[in-house]
Structures are given as structure tokens and as C-alpha cells.
Image (spheres, rainbow, N blue to C red):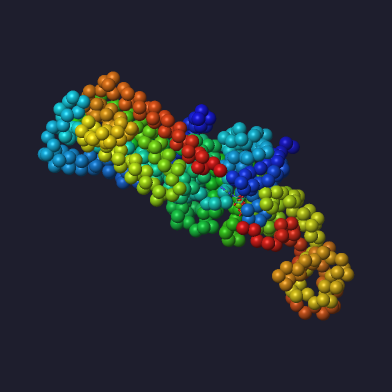
Amino acid sequence: MEPILTAANLTKRYGDLTAVAGIDFDIAPGECFGLLGPNGAGKTSTAKMIYAAVPVTGGCLCVFGRDITRHAREIKKLIGVCPQDVNLDQDFSVLKNLIVYARYFGIGAAEARRKAEELIEFFQLGDKRDRKIESLSGGMKKRLLVVRALVNDPRLLILDEPTAGLDPQARHQIWEKVRQLKKNGTTIVLTTHYMEEAAVLCDRLAIMDRGRIVERGRPADLVARHIGRDVIEIEDPSPAALEEIEAAGARHETFAGRTYVYTEDGRELIARIAREGQAGHVVLRQAGLEDVFLKLTGRQLRE
Amino acid sequence: MIALLRNISYRAAYVWRRNLDVNLVTWQTNFLPPILEPLLYIVAFGFMLGRYVERIAWAGIELDFLTFVAPGMISVAILYHSTFECMYGSFVRMYYQKTFDAIIATPLLIEDVIAGEILWAASKSFFAASIMLVIVSFFGLVEYPSGLVIVLLAFVGGVMFGSFGMIFAAICPSIDTMNLPVFLAVTPMFLFSGTFFPVEGLPAWGRAIAAVSPLTHVVAVARAASLGVLSTAFLPSALYIVAVGAGLFLLAVHLMKRRLVK
Ligand SMILES: Nc1ncnc2c1ncn2[C@@H]1O[C@H](COP(=O)(O)OP(=O)(O)OP(=O)(O)O)[C@@H](O)[C@H]1O
Ligand SMILES: [Mg+2]
């Protein structure tokens, strides 16, 4: 199938600062594509180029088979955007926000109202319907951003950290909606710092760092490729325990007094470590995307 | 420059409509000033100041002070409503409320947004001038049908002053720095454009300000229209408003785009 989005050597510079340093990726129709990466990696800049909020500095970005630089209007018509920063219209109520936003897409008054009411119903915002934006909680504003992104029934949905700051209930509600949209064939670009979210929702993802894509693939494949199956975390390992790990040939690293051991068979190794009389705290858990993320982007803070 | 115009579409009307919707909610506070202001002026200028200044000569015509001042007062409203709407209103929407950021994720381009904002500002001048025109007409201060030209003038002049205000919204780093253009440009324009006294009576430096002030030309056309003496003598002023208005509009779109597109 023709990809819905193709980025080739895509570059974004703000003055001297290179935010996106020539990345290549494409997204198939109906796919949920994740963009992960530390703060300042260039995720939002990439997302903003897709909906033409910032111009492309170099390379090529085609959405729905058209060049974004020349066909921004037509492309934006078919895109829904949940931006990272809240930019709801503070002069209007919740309902009116959705209606006015629908109007920007050229949706008629009656249809706009119907759509707004339908979304309010689905997201259970009925009691907030006539509230002014400033009186909503931070999480509620984020949720409304996601809702607003759906007023034009987008073919491509861009969600830039849609669940940042949401409680678990609200997060699961968004996940449910994303899954439902995917089922209906909507293509989704998702940026997030929640690895669990990326693992659950994304078909494929790219991990960005300093404006480049450092790794990409299906979440489970990435975990298997880079980490293995299990992770053992040991608080202050004894020298004997460390020898045991070395003998087993397992990759390991120590960070802030805590040793992480990556292995295919954690159960067996942990038994051997226990036999050596390791006194400190030992945990065995499944390897996850977060381990991949930290391995590839390091443990230093970014911004 | 041509590219800027090509990027403006009918969708600018959605921005205009958004601003209208906001103002319809608070319409009482928006429509009261244009109704009450002329009444205050008429009391202050007509009945109080008018007692000291009896007749005033303008373009070879002798008139009483109130008849002289009424079109000046409407012209000041045209200046203030659109200039301040773009200077402060658009700045707040752009900078604090992030309204523009939200809109440009839809099929609108930034040029649509800026054009819509300026057209809205011009409409504010149009509404205010129309209401004031009705009020002063009750006092017999306006000749018709030529007085109706003021309604058109309010919109076209509003585009010019709205663009003028938008330029400062584009170049001022913060809302506090807006005091400077108000002090250096808007207030002198308000005083030295033949609004409350004829330009001819000013010293040379005052006449120089008046000559470059866009408001001078708005006042001239408004006064000729309200006195019923419109003629080709006022064509240069009309052309000035159209030409400078178009120039400022393009400059405003250009500068705002430069500020917003990173
Ligand atoms: N408007 C701008 N002007 C100048 N620099 C910018 C601008 N927007 C972003 N940057 C810089 O570009 C880089 C990438 O920023 P971006 O917002 O794309 O990162 P991100 O991956 O979304 O980060 P986060 O996880 O914190 O949201 C950062 O160094 C940031 O400071
Ligand atoms: Mg971001």
C-alpha cells in the first residue's frame, strides 16, 4: 500500500539550532506510528512540520501523496491535531470551542453542532459542556484537545503527548478512543514519554535523539533485539554476584548504585545470584520499551 | 508580496466570525461606548466649549463648533477601534491565548488569520462609526445622503488603522512596549489631524504632523461628507487612504508572518 506519509531527509532548523537533522520514515495507512525520544529530541518539531505549523527547512515531506510545502491547505483539511501545549479558545465554552473549531474546516453550523454534541457525549463531557475553559482542570483541558482534534473526522491524527498529566482513567479513555479510531482506519502519529502507552498503541515507532532517528521498529521487536526477555535489578551487588553475572555472559550496567542485568533467562540467573548470598534487594522483571529507550538514548538528563 | 495576497482566502471570514461570536456575548459593553461617547462630546463641546468658540472656518465654510467637531469625533472612533483592536486584541490572542496557533492547524493559513483579524478590526470601526453617525444625526449635525459615505470610510479607514495597529503587534516584543507607539504615533495623530481644530491654525511643525497623519485624510473626507460638500478636492485624501491602507495591510501581514513563522 502507498504510504500516507513519507519523510525523506526531513530537516528543521530554528536559526542556528538544528532540531530535526535529516530523518527518513514513512507511515502506512491505518498505522499508529510512535515518535519517542528525550526532551528536545525533535518530536514536536517533526509533528509541526506534518501539519505545516512550521515550515520544512530541508528534505521532503509528503502527506497523502502531496508535498506539504505546496499543498498545506488540502493536507490540513484531512488532519486532526492535538498539540503538546494547550491552545483552547479561552473566550468560549467547551461546546462552543468545538463548534468554532469545526467552522475553521468549513463544516456548516448544523453539522458542527451535531459533531460537537456527539464528541461531548462519547467523551462524557456533558457536565462540562457550558463551562469556560479557564475553569477546567489541566487534565480536562488536555482531554478536550484530543476531542477537538476529531471534529473534522481526520484521516491522519497527530497526537503530541496527548496523555501528559492525565489520570489513569482518562488515559485509558484516550487509549480506547485511539484503538477505536485505528479500527476505523485512521492513521495516527503519536508522541509520548509513557513507554507503556507506546508499547500498547504503536504498531511501529521511531526513537529520536538530538534530531536523528536512532532506532525504529515494532515495539516487541525492539525489546527483543536490544534487551532480551528479562531484566534483573540488583541493589549494591556483592562481588560474588557480579562474578556470577560475568560468568553467565549477561550484558549489565550499573547506574547510581543499581545494577541492571539483561538476559534471556532471568529466572535461572537470579537463582544463581541468590545462591551466592546476595544480600541487597533483587528484582526480576520483564524487559520493556523503557529499557530500550534508556539503552539507546543514555541516562543523562537532556534539557 | 503577491504570495502574501495569494495565501489569503475566504477562510479569513471564519476568523472574523470567531471574533464576532466573542463580541456578541459581551455586546452590551461593546455597543454602549459608541452610543454614549457622542452624547458626552455634544455636552462637553457643544454646550460648554461651544460657548467660547462660536464660529469656526473650514474649507471656506463658516460653521458652529459642534458641526465642525462631530465628524472629527467619529474619525477618532474609527482610529481607536481598529488600531487598538489589532494592537492589543490581536496581540493577546496571538501571544497569550495562542489562538492563532490553534487556528493554523486547520485549513487556514497564517495570512488568512491576520487578514481576518484586520477585517474584524475594520468592522469594529464600522459598527462604532455607524452608531455614532445615527446619534449625531439626531442633532442635525450630518447632511444626507453624502453623510452615508462615512460608513464606507469607517471600514476602509478601519482596514488602514487595523493594519497600522497590527504592525505594532508584530514588532513589539511585549504588551508593555505598546505604550511607546501609542504615545509617539496614536496620540499625536489624535490631536493634530484636524479633529478638534483646523489644521491650518497649527504652527509649522503641527502642520507637518498633520500632513503625514493618515487620520487627517479620514477627518477631511468625513467632514466633507457630513457637511455635504464632497468634491474632487477630497479625491487625494480618498486615494491616500486606499493606497496607504493597502500598503500598511501588506506590511502588517508580512511582519506578522515574520514574527510567527519560525
Ligand atoms: N520556536 C522555536 N525556536 C527555537 N528553537 C526551538 C523552537 N521550538 C523548538 N526549538 C528547539 O528545537 C529542539 C527540539 O524541540 P522539540 O520541541 O521538537 O522537542 P521534543 O522532542 O518535542 O521535546 P519534548 O519532549 O520536550 O516535547 C529543542 O532544542 C528546542 O529548544
Ligand atoms: Mg514535544
Which quadrant of the rendered structure holds the C terminus of chain A? bottom right
Q: Which residue is located at x 82 percent, y 73 percent?
A: A242
Q: Is residue B178 left or right of residue A252?
A: left
Q: Is residue A75 visible?
A: yes
Residue projecting furthest to the right = A247
Could you say which is closer to the camera, residue A260 or residue B26? A260
* The quarter of the displayed image where residue B16 is located: top left
Tally of numbered tags: 0
**Location of residue B156 in the rendering, given as x and y in whole percent from the top left corner:** 36, 30
Which quadrant of the rendered structure holds the N terminus of chain A? top right
Q: Is residue A267 left or right of residue B73?
A: right
Q: Is residue B171 left or right of residue A241?
A: left
Q: Is residue B131 visible?
A: no
Q: Which residue is located at x 86 percent, y 72 percent?
A: A244
**Location of residue B167 in the rendering, given as x and y in whole percent from the top left corner:** 43, 39
**Location of residue A249 in the rendering, given as x and y in whole percent from the top left corner:** 87, 66
Could you say which is closer to the camera, residue A34 or residue B179? B179
Residue projecting furthest to the front = B204
Classify B28 as above or below A127. Answer: above
Classify B259 as above or below A259. Answer: above
Q: Which residue is located at x 68 percent, y 38 percent?
A: A59
**Location of residue A155 in the rendering, given as x and y in whole percent from the top left corner:** 63, 40
Could you say which is closer to the camera, residue A39 or residue A88? A39
Q: Which residue is located at x 52 percent, y 56 percent?
A: A140
